[in-house]
Image: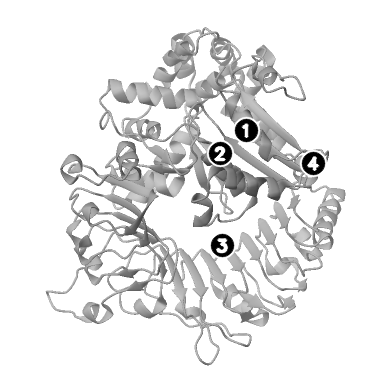
């Protein structure tokens, strides 16, 4: 039965510290009713291999299986296949899982109890049961109240609500979402009398409860919720993408002077709080990275969308090459050699074709005048100047194998909010064109907020046209001939919160930092890659008053020793060190007084984690992945020392250390 807690139980095991320690590799894949063998193999491989290249997507099923077999050979691995409906899934895959008697495990979840017999599993199925009254009440209290304790005045009606859930955890969670934001006795009494009893043997009976939950949604949240039914079953939806799609479809409306993105994020969090949307992955700053909707709720969305004629009967995403495609029937047609018939899609607002590789940016897409959201993958993704014909376009996402040249006409698109290029060192055309101040010059893009993967050489004069940029990514030469970090002055971008600097200019010696004045005061997140800075230069970033996240990746700094000295990163909450050649790191608690999370990834020469970090009262997590055993052991010692002093909040995680 849906909602018994099968996936929740397995996730508890999967994320357990001992399980993480025992297994060399872990993979989690959702199978669902409709699956493609290739998609499953790609999903499993993506857990073991960072950033799968295009070559993997062009391999045959058997070639992918061989890659998987060789990767797992001799290793101890745990693979979870979640939500299996047919034993043929295992029959298709089992030859690619080597059995070397190392203690590896493949774990299934299914609604079919007999599946374990069909696949000849090594263990009998663990059959989950409905919860008893006390267990159900414990779930309800935990979901509704921060301290997990129900006040006496609400207990009577809470028990009545809980009883009608008949021990089904999903129903309990939904009911909790109905009452958690309104603790009046009148409201709880009303819910206790209107929440129908469930027939546990027939999931269709839950529609009453789901309908009740939907009917009590504020009107502005209902279309956002129904849109979730557009995504494939078990698909993890990137939050940024979901927010952009809501805006493009016109489901979110401005409130006062607030940006649409902020309003949409508030809608997202409201749906999560109401238990209608589940978080899948969390970012380093504890923000939601991906989310998903339960199968039962998705089915409800589809039924309700049809009932209310929401958008159209054909508004669903399809899956092609492990990537969603919208509209689904157009994706299938293009994959089979068809073309975009503009007349059939003249009212289309969203065109997401990232799962299909074009040779050139498709000109047909530019003729769909109503587009708000356009996502394209092409070997040469440079858009034609006619891209500006899409006057309503708000989001342009481009993936390409070549560096992209963005035509200067892009700055005539006054509704553009996000230009997201996923790779390469890309050029924005027409810097001189933008310098003009005449009446015929391009206007200010007041809603423009995201610009990524662009060369700093082509950005010197565009920021006066984009004063509200929030996210900016430079990729290109960022080191001067004298060895200084160098990029356009960003001081005027008062709303800039996230900045990525990826240098492509090789410099033979350690480089120097730039004047902190070049950074806007409100900057919260900074990522440096391949900048080759001397560790002694790091103190300059401590002068950024609002910096909360600092990521140093792939030779961002070079040298064997980092002594933080007197530098105080006053607001820093997250510090990530990736692929650096550092050997020794010395720091004190006062250097990072508000640090919450430390991630050290593939710093293979680092001998130990500074003991001073353990004395930071706010520190919650230390992750040590792909490093030396001594580095991981030092983190464990820090945890033990804190536990001996009564601090049980600090957690240490580690994997693939050697």
Q: CA distance from mark 3 to mark 1?
A: 37 Å
Query: How many residues crowd mark 1 within 10 Å: few (<14), some (14–19), many (20+)?
Result: many
Q: CA distance from mark 2 to mark 1?
A: 9 Å
- Mark 3 or mark 4, which is nearer the start of the sequence? 4
Residue beneath the point at 53% across and 67% down: 526
Q: CA distance from mark 1 to mark 4?
A: 20 Å
Q: Which residue is mark 3?
A: 548
- Mark 1 or mark 3, which is nearer the start of the sequence? 1
Residue 57 vs residue 193, the one in the foreground: 57
Q: Is residue 510 left or right of residue 336?
A: right
Q: Which residue is mark 4?
A: 18
- Label 2–label 1 contact, CB within 8 A: yes
Which mark's residue is nearer the viewer, 1 or 4?
A: 1
User: What kind of element bears circle 4?
Assistant: helix
Which mark's residue is nearer the viewer, 4 or 3?
A: 4
Quadrant into which the N terminus falls: top right
Query: How many residues crowd mark 4 within 10 Å: few (<14), some (14–19), many (20+)?
Result: few
Residue 328 in the image, given as x and y percentages of width and height: 34, 37
Which mark's residue is nearer the viewer, 3 or 2?
A: 2
Q: Which residue is mark 1?
A: 81
Q: Quadrant of residue 144?
A: top right
Figure check: 561 above or below 444: below
Residue beneath the point at 37% across and 74% down: 492
Q: Which residue is mark 2?
A: 40
Q: CA distance from mark 2 to mark 4?
A: 26 Å
- Label 1–label 4 contact, CB within 8 A: no
């Amino acid at each position: 039965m849906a909602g018994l807690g099968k996936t929740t139980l397995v996730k508890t095991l999967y994320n357990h510290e001992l399980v993480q320690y025992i297994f060399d590799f872990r993979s989690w894949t959702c199978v669902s009713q409709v699956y493609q063998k290739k998609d499953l193999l790609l999903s499993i491989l993506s857990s073991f291999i960072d950033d799968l290249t295009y070559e993997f997507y062009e391999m045959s099923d058997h070639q992918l299986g061989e890659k998987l077999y060789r990767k797992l050979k001799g290793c101890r691995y745990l693979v979870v296949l979640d939500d299996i409906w047919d034993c043929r899934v295992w029959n298709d895959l089992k030859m690619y899982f080597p059995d070397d008697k190392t203690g590896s495990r493949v774990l299934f979840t299914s609604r079919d109890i007999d599946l374990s017999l069909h696949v000849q599993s090594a263990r009998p199925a663990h059959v989950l049961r409905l919860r008893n009254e006390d267990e159900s009440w414990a779930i309800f209290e935990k979901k509704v109240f921060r301290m997990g304790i129900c006040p006496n005045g609400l207990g009577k009606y809470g028990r009545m609500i809980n009883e009608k859930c008949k021990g089904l955890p999903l129903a309990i969670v939904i009911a909790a979402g109905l009452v958690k934001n309104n603790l009046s006795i009148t409201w709880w009494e009303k819910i206790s009398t209107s929440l129908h009893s469930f027939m546990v043997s027939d999931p269709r009976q839950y529609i009453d409860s789901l309908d009740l939950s939907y009917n009590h949604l504020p009107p502005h949240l209902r279309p956002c919720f129904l849109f979730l039914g557009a995504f494939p079953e078990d698909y993890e939806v990137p939050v940024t993408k979901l927010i952009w799609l809501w805006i493009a479809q016109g489901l979110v409306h401005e409130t006062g002077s607030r940006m649409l993105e902020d309003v949409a994020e508030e809608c997202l969090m409201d749906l999560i709080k109401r238990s209608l949307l589940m978080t899948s992955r969390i970012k380093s700053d504890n923000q939601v990275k991906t989310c998903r909707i339960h199968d039962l709720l998705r089915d409800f969305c589809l039924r309700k969308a049809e009932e209310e004629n929401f958008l159209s009967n054909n508004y669903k995403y399809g899956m092609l090459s492990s990537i969603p495609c919208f509209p689904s029937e157009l994706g299938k047609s293009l994959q089979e050699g068809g073309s975009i018939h503009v007349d059939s899609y003249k009212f289309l607002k969203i065109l997401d074709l990232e799962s299909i590789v074009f040779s050139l940016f498709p000109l047909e897409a530019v003729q769909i005048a109503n587009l708000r959201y356009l996502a394209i993958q092409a070997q040469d993704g440079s858009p034609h100047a006619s891209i500006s014909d899409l006057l309503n376009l708000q989001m342009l996402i481009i993936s390409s194998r070549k560096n992209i040249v963005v035509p200067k006409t892009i700055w005539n698109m006054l509704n553009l909010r996000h230009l997201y290029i996923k790779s390469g060192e890309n050029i924005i055309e027409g810097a001189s064109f933008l310098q003009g101040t005449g009446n015929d010059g391009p206007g200010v893009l007041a809603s423009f907020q995201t610009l990524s993967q662009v060369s700093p050489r082509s950005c010197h004069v565009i920021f006066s046209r984009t004063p509200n940029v929030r996210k900016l990514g430079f990729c290109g030469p960022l080191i001067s001939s004298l060895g200084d970090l160098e990029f356009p002055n960003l001081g005027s971008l008062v709303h800039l919160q996230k900045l990525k600097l990826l240098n492509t200019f090789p410099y033979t010696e350690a480089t120097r930092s730039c004047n902190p004045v070049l950074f806007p005061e409100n900057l919260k997140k900074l990522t440096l890659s391949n900048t080759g800075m001397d560790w002694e230069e790091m103190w300059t970033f401590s002068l950024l008053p609002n910096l909360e996240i600092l990521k140093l990746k792939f030779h961002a700094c070079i040298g064997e020793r980092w002594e933080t000295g007197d530098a105080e990163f006053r607001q820093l909450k997250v510090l990530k060190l990736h692929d650096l050649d550092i050997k020794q790191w010395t720091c004190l608690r006062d250097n990072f007084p508000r640090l919450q999370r430390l991630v050290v990834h593939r710093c293979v020469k680092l001998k130990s984690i500074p003991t001073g970090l353990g004395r930071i009262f706010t520190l919650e997590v230390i992750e040590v992945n792909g490093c030396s055993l001594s580095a991981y052991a030092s983190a464990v010692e820090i945890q033990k020392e804190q536990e001996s002093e009564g601090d049980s909040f600090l957690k240490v995680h580690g994997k693939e250390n050697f």
